[in-house]
Image (tube, rainbow, N blue to C red):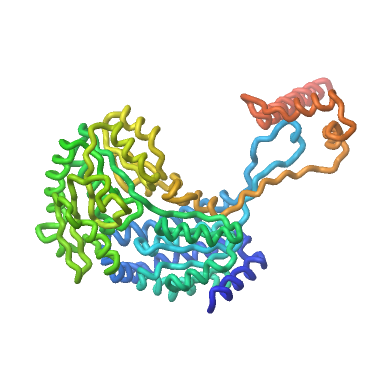
């Protein structure tokens, strides 16, 4: 089926109003949850084939992550879908003012290869919960996972409302020619620009989950063993093929030396003497990415690691020292298990260095000095921040996840995913009764100073206690007064 035909089928289904029913959404979300739970072993298999992911990483960072998120969506989405009641001025006292969450329509979700299940399916759950139809385009770079989604997801979800579309650059290009109501893309900044340009044709709103060079500032005052473990773990998960992986380290020469010494011991504890034989280290996804990453090590001063095997697409966890800003390692997002260290004299130099580049998707700060932490937080813009750990801010469902500047736009996770796929429709409902009309008479010509002053007062924003609470208080005291009056009358009678 062509891209045009798939989009048309989804649009026809949406226009029928099928997905607007909360009960329909419930059935689809529960079916998606069954899909996860009934296919766990198959998911582990395809992730191993595509990336040689260990069972623990596959389950915790992909499958279990999806299950936890979806169970939260199922528990909360009906409340999220209820109209909210914002504050209103005195002039709207008689009006019903609300914000309605309505679906955009047909959403396109373009997933990424590094977490090929999570990054394709977690946005889908939010799109379903918000009442959209959706077309999922998994990454062709993880072909086993893409084919698994294509073959199995339609067995669980409504085949008119939700579709899976496979293909490479040519097929994605054709897909982007179609008109969508929302586009959600995860991937590189360069392709993000292409997606954004395609969306502009129809002024389609987009979420772009991109990447960039996420820095780590490492202070001298930390427990270096703990800090090194947390930084290296963030770099080694998925062999560094994570959009929020620590990309480079900023620290003093003394901290650099201590980090390297601790790193050697920690990596030996984790992976043994032969890292390549460890079942716990992922592989680079394909030959092109392997060549790109290993090329970055040319002429590098390697302090730890540096081993690689093209036959297995294996690259050992590698730490590079004496790195200069114009080195190849600092010109692009590494997206591999290589960590360059740039020495700085103090936190001010680290802040200046980060701010010379593009705004990162993640910022990591390791320090026990609250003054330094606050200084970095106040002076460096980033999609998200994690202090004294890496990656783990992603696990907090209530924290929106997204980039800023070249690292992306928009955010998701938890309720934020529902909100991303919902248009917030501002609504005011006013009656046609004569009393309400009396309050608004002053807006009609002929205009006078008296009318203008009245309307200016009525429209004025009230500081402190909101009008809604004043109304509630008035009703309370009116009710209390009525109760005393009723009691008095009964006593008299």
Q: Is residue 164 above or below residue 306?
A: below
In this image, 311 relative to 141: left or right? left
**Residue 399 horizontal/vertical position (percent):** 44, 44
Q: Residue at x 58, y 58 (%)?
A: 204
Residue at the front extreme of this rendering: 326
- Image coordinates of residue 365 in percent, x first then y, are 30, 38
Farthest residue toward the bottom? 1
Position in image of residue 144 (x %, y %): 35, 73
Looking at this rendering, what residue extends furthest in the right direction? 446
Split into 4 quadrants, where in the image is the C terminus? top right
Q: Write the residue at 67% across / 68% down.
A: 16
Q: Foreground residue, 434 or 8?
A: 8
Residue at point 23% right, 45% down? 324
Examine the image and state in which quarter residue 421 appears: bottom right
Q: Can you see residue 67? A: no
Position in image of residue 21 (x %, y %): 63, 61
Left or right: 74 as drawn, with respect to 187:
right
Against 111, is 427 above or below?
above
**Residue 72 in sight from this viewpoint:** yes
Q: Is residue 223 above or below residue 360?
A: above
Count of marks placed on residues? 0
* Camera-side residue of 71 and 116: 116
- 329 left or right, relative to 79: left
């Amino acid at each position: 089926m062509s891209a045009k035909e798939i989009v048309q089928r989804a649009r026809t289904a949406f226009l029928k109003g099928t997905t607007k029913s909360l009960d329909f959404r419930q059935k689809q979300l529960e079916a998606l949850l069954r899909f996860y739970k009934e296919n766990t072993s198959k998911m582990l298999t395809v992730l191993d084939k595509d990336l040689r992911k260990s069972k623990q990483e596959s389950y915790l960072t992909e499958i279990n992550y999806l299950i936890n998120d979806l169970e939260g969506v199922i528990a909360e989405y009906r409340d999220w879908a209820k109209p909210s009641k914002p504050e209103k001025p005195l002039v709207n006292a008689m009006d019903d003012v609300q914000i309605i969450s309505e679906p955009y329509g047909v959403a396109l979700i373009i997933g990424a290869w590094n977490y090929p299940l999570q990054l394709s399916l977690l946005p889908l759950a939010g799109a379903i919960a918000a009442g959209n139809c959706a077309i999922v385009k998994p990454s062709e770079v993880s072909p086993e996972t893409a084919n698994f989604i294509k073959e199995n997801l339609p067995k669980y979800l409504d085949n008119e409302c939700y579709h899976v579309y496979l293909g490479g650059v040519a097929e994605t290009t054709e897909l982007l020619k179609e008109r969508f109501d929302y586009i959600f893309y995860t991937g590189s900044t360069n392709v993000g620009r292409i997606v954004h340009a395609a969306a502009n044709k129809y002024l389609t709103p987009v979420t772009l989950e991109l990447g960039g060079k996420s820095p780590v500032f490492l202070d001298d005052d930390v427990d270096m063993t703990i800090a090194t473990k947390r930084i290296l773990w963030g770099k080694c998960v998925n062999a560094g093929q994570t959009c929020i992986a620590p990309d480079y380290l900023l620290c003093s020469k003394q901290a650099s030396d201590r980090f390297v010494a601790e790193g050697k011991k920690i990596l030996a504890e984790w992976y043994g003497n032969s890292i390549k034989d460890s079942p716990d280290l992922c592989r680079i996804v394909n030959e092109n990415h392997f060549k790109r990453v290993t090329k970055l090590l040319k002429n590098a001063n390697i302090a730890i690691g540096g081993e690689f095997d093209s036959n297995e697409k294996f690259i050992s966890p590698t730490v590079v020292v004496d790195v200069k800003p114009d080195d190849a390692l600092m010109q692009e997002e590494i997206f591999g298990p290589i960590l360059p260290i740039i020495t700085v004299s103090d936190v001010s130099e680290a802040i200046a260095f980060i701010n010379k580049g593009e705004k990162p998707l993640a910022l990591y700060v390791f320090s026990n000095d609250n003054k330094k932490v606050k200084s970095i937080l106040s002076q460096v813009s980033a999609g998200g921040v994690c202090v004294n750990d890496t990656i783990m801010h992603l696990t907090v469902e209530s924290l929106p996840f997204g980039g800023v500047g070249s690292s992306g736009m928009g955010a998701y996770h938890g309720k934020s995913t529902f909100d991303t796929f919902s248009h917030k429709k501002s609504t005011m409902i006013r009656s046609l009764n004569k009393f309400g009309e009396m309050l608004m008479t002053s807006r009609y010509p002929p205009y006078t100073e008296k009318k203008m002053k009245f309307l200016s007062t009525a429209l004025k924003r009230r500081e402190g206690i909101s009008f809604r609470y004043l109304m509630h208080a008035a009703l309370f005291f009116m009710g209390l007064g009525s109760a005393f009056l009723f009691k008095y009358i009964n006593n008299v009678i």
